[in-house]
Amino acid sequence: MNPSKAKDPVPFNRPFETLRDNVVGRPAPAAKPLSPPHPESPCEESLFREAMKGVREIREFRSLRPAQGKIVPQRRPRPDNRDAAAALQELVSGKGTWDISRTQEYVSWINPKYRLDLASRLHEGRFSMRDCLDLHGMVVDDAEEAVRIFLKESLRRGYQCVKIIHGRGLRSPRGPVIKEALVRWLSGRHRKHIAAFVTARQCDGGLGALYILLH
């Protein structure tokens, strides 16, 4: 058999034959640069120096000296309460007088149709009192009816000034209930017949009574 006429042998399958050439001929990828480290936070001294840039020293302050010795606070003179104590002693003994119009229990009301000084004149006793009603011991409903009848009768008789005793409610656990109700009645439903009402003088019941001026 002629070797030259023999069939060519089947080539060997080498699928990665060209891979080596490609790998060898290709340059290696460049390494990624490392990220720079984070800058360190500035220290407090650096921050202080940065904040104090441009600040100028006041040299004149170098010559100032701290005050020597202790600071003694000034004492205010005590008020002289001898006059107040003497007035209080007179009130306790019954010899002195006091202005009840400056107390919180004082009551004063004036109809808008009249002058403002009418209440002070009424409190001073400038009008002659013609009749009186005492509400001591009454409940609110009974007192309301008694006031209505009293005012109606006083108007019928032509009385100009009357007095109603309401008490101060010092012994009542609810306070001056009758007094507060009386003020509401006089300044409300009965106001069309009333020119003014005010707390009576001390000799006529004081904070426990009202002068009422009718019209």
Image (tube, rainbow, N blue to C red):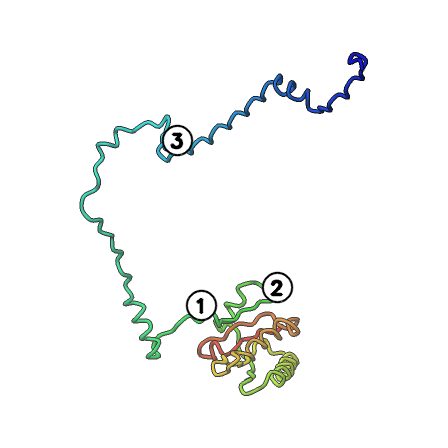
- Looking at the image, the residue that sits furthest to the top is 4
In the image, what residue type sits under mark 1? Arg
Give the Cα distance between marks 1 and 3: 63 Å
**Residue 102 numbered tag:** 1
How far from the left and from the top, in percent, is residue 101? Answer: 46, 69
Observer-side mark, 2 or 1, equals: 1
In the image, what residue type sits under mark 2? Pro
Observer-side mark, 1 or 3, equals: 3
Q: Badge 1, how many Cα within 10 Å: few under 14, some, many 20+?
A: few
Which residue bears the numbered disc 2? Answer: 112
Considering the image in quadrants, where does the C terminus appear? Answer: bottom right
Residue name at image x 58 percent, y 22 percent: 29
Residue name at image x 75 percent, y 21 percent: 11
Q: Is residue 38 above or below residue 23?
A: below
Q: Dot 3: what SS?
A: helix
- Looking at the image, the residue that sits furthest to the front is 1
Q: Badge 2, how many Cα within 10 Å: few under 14, some, many 20+?
A: few
